[in-house]
Image (cartoon, rainbow, N blue to C red):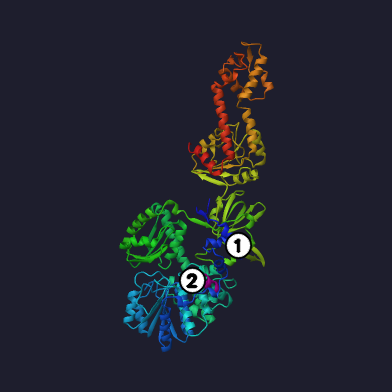
Amino acid sequence: MTSNGRRWITAPADPARVEELSQKLGILPVVAQILINRGVTGVEEARQFLHPDFDQLLPPAEMKGMEEAVLRIRRALDRGEKIVIYGDYDADGVTAAALLVRTIEKLGGEAGFFLPSRFQEGYGVHREALQQIQEEGASLVITVDCGITAGEEARYGRRIGLDLVITDHHQPQGPLPEAIAVLNPLQEDCPYRFKWLSGVGVAFKLATALMEQAGEEVPHSLLDLVALGTVADMVPLLGENRALVSLGLAGINGSPRVGLKALAGVVGLQSKEIDSTSLAFNLGPALNAAGRMGDADPAVRLLLEENPERAQKLARFLYRQNQLRRDTGDKIFAEAEAIVTADPRAAGERVITLAREGWHPGVIGIVASRLVERFYRPVVIIAVVEGVGCGSARSIPGFNITAALEECAALLEDFGGHDQAAGLTIAPERVKELREQLNRLAGDRLQAKDLVPRCHIEAELPGHQVNMELANQLSCLEPFGVGNPVPVFGSRSWELRSWRLVGAGKNHLKLNFTREDRSLRPIFFSGAPLAPRLRRYRKLDLAFNLRAGTFREQPVLNVELKDLCYSDSSIFGRLELVDRRSEPGRINYIRELSGGGEGVALFVTTRRREEMLKRRLPPEAVTFISSGKKYRETREQVCEHLVLYDLPLHFRLLAPYFKEQGRLPRIWVHLLYSSRSREINDKLAALSLPSRSALQQIYRALLETAAGVGEELIFPGNLAGRFAYSDQYWRRCRDILVEAGLLAAGPGRQVVLAANDPKGWREKVEQSATYRSTRKLAEECHEFQERLLKDDRRELVEYLGSFLEKY
């Protein structure tokens, strides 16, 4: 069992580097391992990672085109030209627009801003917008978070008297626009050492260069905007981005701008320290909601607002837009999920492609991401609006969705993106062809293993390392985000003691685990669907985050589960094997299992064991199977669970259960015995399967009793008093000795001593068919028990599963 069938992948350890970083930096070895997992392997590099500061910000003059951009903007400021910041409608573009508007104003200039509508102009620079800007008296346009592909628009702007300075961070495609300057670390021959700035990061570099040129201080007060836009745009939080976000968060938590303070209040962060998670999941989505649901301008105005009352009104508006965005997205997601689950063809396809009229184009990207998380396969969601299909695609590792769309370009009106996300425009009548072609491509490129979701484990922790010391040191790895995710740890074999549903809707699981002398009480958000599959006293492997927190002014260790799986079981076909060999608490385990509403069959070696357990278990809690009892009881009831309280001598003792219950879709076999069961079984075997030495003793006793060859005897007669064997045992002995020619069978229990051969008896006995079958059965018993005692869980489930497949 895992929460969604994920495959756990643990990062490889590097003990030598771990020891070096740990000793030289004074950090725990597991924290050193996390740094190595991030590609941070040198001591100085690690020191900078752990202590981001202003010295880690690169000089803006390194960026190609910066000198030309600063000169043109400086000239506009000197001449009193009107400048317009042309942005994008997402959080990156919004924060970048606000940042440059405020920078131009600080330098004494006049700056306006223009954000295109997602539903009218769409993304990017547009001729009609440039025409409007020019007619309103502007002579210089500075793009932020867009423009790198606006070659034709830049030429048009020049024709109508508009100069363009383009700042962008997206991958250039083809020749660069003919602008006054192009600032983009990804452009060819740009010597800027860090390539993964966000749009607002590039804008900040321009702002820094402008302030430095004017002899002003570096605009550190704008780093709050840089932090928000960078995190929201999901660029890697490594290198310079890490320093920008860390410094920006310090500003937000120190003296936040009026607009951000108001927004933090309406989203419930007014009394909490804001971190990168708050930016990604609270402030960023609220800022994005304006552009997703309508006009993005209120978001920029909020960031520029200095009046608390007006800021509060704008923040409440954005909050309502975000609620609308959530409700709309939830509705579309539910509809899309229902379509996939109801359509066997869609559920079996490697790329899910859905289109519908009435879906809101502003939220389909979020819905696509949620569907990828739900079904773990590439997803294309298309909203049909006024006869045009506006699509958003999201993918999984191993399938470059933009490259796939390029191979479908003949079906599309427009598309663009990167390997894991893309946007597209398509005529509704071409959607069916797109679906078929994408699935043909995915059939060649995605194997079955690629469609199994993954859970990446930073390191495995023994129980004693899950502690406050580690949680406190993890804070030095913040800010977390893309490229530096919140660490997920693994820890094995925790025994589940209890759990309960929590939260207003009872959607979350609060669990209690123990391991050796330690306890752990994690929470699993949205884990309620797992509750019916949980069993007390089972062992589970846990994947989790750790965070230091406080409760009633006392430090607490907050543990959030990300996944869990049973560590005591393996699956082969329809059989799941639960391995609790030699574990204590067998009675409690059976009580818990039998109280789950499913049938339980319990194997014990003897009737005496059965009677003992009946006294200790609730009445009719289980159906008993024992070595000396034929299996009939479960014919009238379903028993999905077979519990081996004792070690069976042979599979034949279990065969009736598998024959009666073997058609069930799933069977659980629980191993509760220990090696001590072998001692009992050896005694049982000795009482039912005659060995060579036992036969020798019996034959010698017969020779001592009889007067000579030909004498009639009652078998076993007086021997039964000397040897305490079962009737079945004596019957086997009689058959063996008769087949060996040492006895002759008479009527009833009578036998005749047929030979007096104390030396040659062995060879004669070994010719007996009954003896050979008895010894074969003894060997089978030995092998069966050896495997049930010594095989590991994975070997054993295949071994027992092979028997099940016969029924």
Kind of residue sitting beneath label 2: Thr
Q: Is residue 19 above or below residue 253?
A: above
Residue 478 visible (yes or no): no
Please state if 549 lies on the left or on the right of 168 as rendered: right
Q: Position of residue 271 (x, y in %)?
A: 60, 72
* For the residues bearing labels 1 and 2, Cβ distance under 8 angstroms: no
The residue mark sitting in front, 1 or 2, is 1
Residue at image point 43% right, 85% down: 74
Q: Residue furthest bottom?
A: 79
Residue at image point 45% right, 70% down: 195
Magenta residues, as a range? 240-247
Q: Which badge, 1 or 2, is on the more N-terminal residue?
A: 1
Q: Secondary structure at mark 1?
A: helix
Q: Residue furthest left?
A: 410
Marks 1/2: CA distance?
30 Å
Residue 230 tag number: 2
Kind of residue sitting beneath label 1: Ser
- Is 386 included in the stretch rendered in magenta? no
Within 10 Å of disc 1 (Cα), the crowding (few <14, some 14-19, many 20+) is some
Judged by its main secondary structure, the magenta piece is helix
Q: Position of residue 589 (x, y in %)?
A: 62, 45
